[in-house]
Amino acid sequence: MIYVALPKGRLGEKVYNLLSSVGYSCKEYNDANRKLIFKDEENGVAYFWVKPSDVAIYVSQGTADIGVVGKDILEETSPDLYELLDLNIGKCSMCVAAKADFYDDYSKPLKVATKFTNCAKRYFDSIGRETEIIKLNGSIELAPILGMSDVIFDIVETGTTLKHNNLVVLEKVFPISTRLVANKAQYKFKKELILSLCEKLKGVIKL
Ligand code: PRP
C-alpha cells in the first residue's frame, strides 16, 4: 500500500489524474465528494486530501509516504524529505514586484510584504539589501498600493493580479513547479514501489 498526500484543489486533481493514468486509480474517487481519504486495496493506494501548505508536513511526519508540493513551499519551509521528481505542472515564479514608479531609497531598509518570509530574507540577504519583512497571509498585492510596503515578494503565475493592481515585476527570483516528494524512512522501506511509480510518472509527465 502506498499513502499519498495530495493538495486539495485543481492541482491535486491534476496529480490524481496523472497517478490514476499509471495504475493508481481509486474506485471510490469522486472529485465532487468532500471525503478526505480514498483507498483502493486492489491498486494498493490511499489518497489523503490535505491543505496544500500541509502536504510536506504529512510526508515528513511519515503519515503519507509520498506527496506533491510546490517548490515555493519546499524553499520556504525546508522540510526533511526527499524531492524525487519535477512534475512540470503548477508552474509560476517567485518575484519581487512594486508599483511602476517605485524608486529604491537605499538610505532606508526596504519594506517587503510577503507570505514567504524565509525565502524573502534569504534573497535580500544574498544581494546585501537591508529589509523590514512584513508577514502577510494573502492579498499581498495590497501592501504597496496602500503604502504599507515598498515591494512584495510573491508568486506570479499569469501576471493578472499584478496587472489589475498596477504593479510590475522587478526581479524573477526563482522558478516554481510541483514536485513529488517522499518521506525519508518510508522511501527506504518502499523503495521499489516508489521508484516504479516515479518511472511510470516520467512516462506521462509533459515536458
Ligand atoms: C497567488 C499569489 C498572487 C496570485 C498570482 O495568490 O499570491 O496573488 O496568486 O497569480 P496570477 O499571476 O495568475 O494573478 P492566491 O490566489 O493564492 O491568493 P492569496 O492572495 O490568498 O495568496
Image (cartoon, helix red, strand yellow):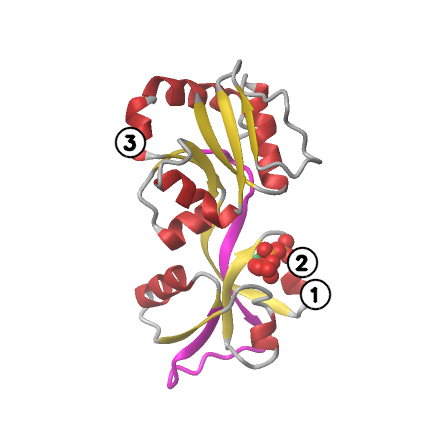
Residue 148 seen in the current view: yes
Q: Quadrant of residue 37?
A: top right
Q: Position of residue 54 (x, y in %)?
A: 46, 47
**Which residue carries the number 3 mark?**
185
Q: Which label was assigned to residue 160?
A: 2
Mark closest to the chain's N terminus, 1 or 3 = 1
**Mark 1 Cβ and ligand 1 under 8 Å apart:** yes
**Mark 2 Cβ and ligand 1 under 8 Å apart:** yes
Compared with 175, 4 (above or below) is: above
Does dot 1 land on a helix, a strand or a loop?
A: helix
Q: Along the line of sight, which residue is nearer the eye, 86 or 107? A: 86
Q: Along the line of sight, which residue is nearer the eye, 149 or 62? A: 62
Name the residue at 52% across, 30% down: 47
Distance from label 1 to label 3 (Cα)? 46 Å
Mark closest to the chain's N terminus, 2 or 3 = 2
Compared with 186, 90 (above or below) is: below
Q: Position of residue 176 (x, y in %)?
A: 48, 47
Labelled pair 2, 3 in contact (Cβ < 8 Å): no
Does dot 2 land on a helix, a strand or a loop?
A: helix
Labelled pair 2, 1 in contact (Cβ < 8 Å): yes
Bounds of the magenta segment: 86-113
Q: Quadrant of residue 182?
A: top left
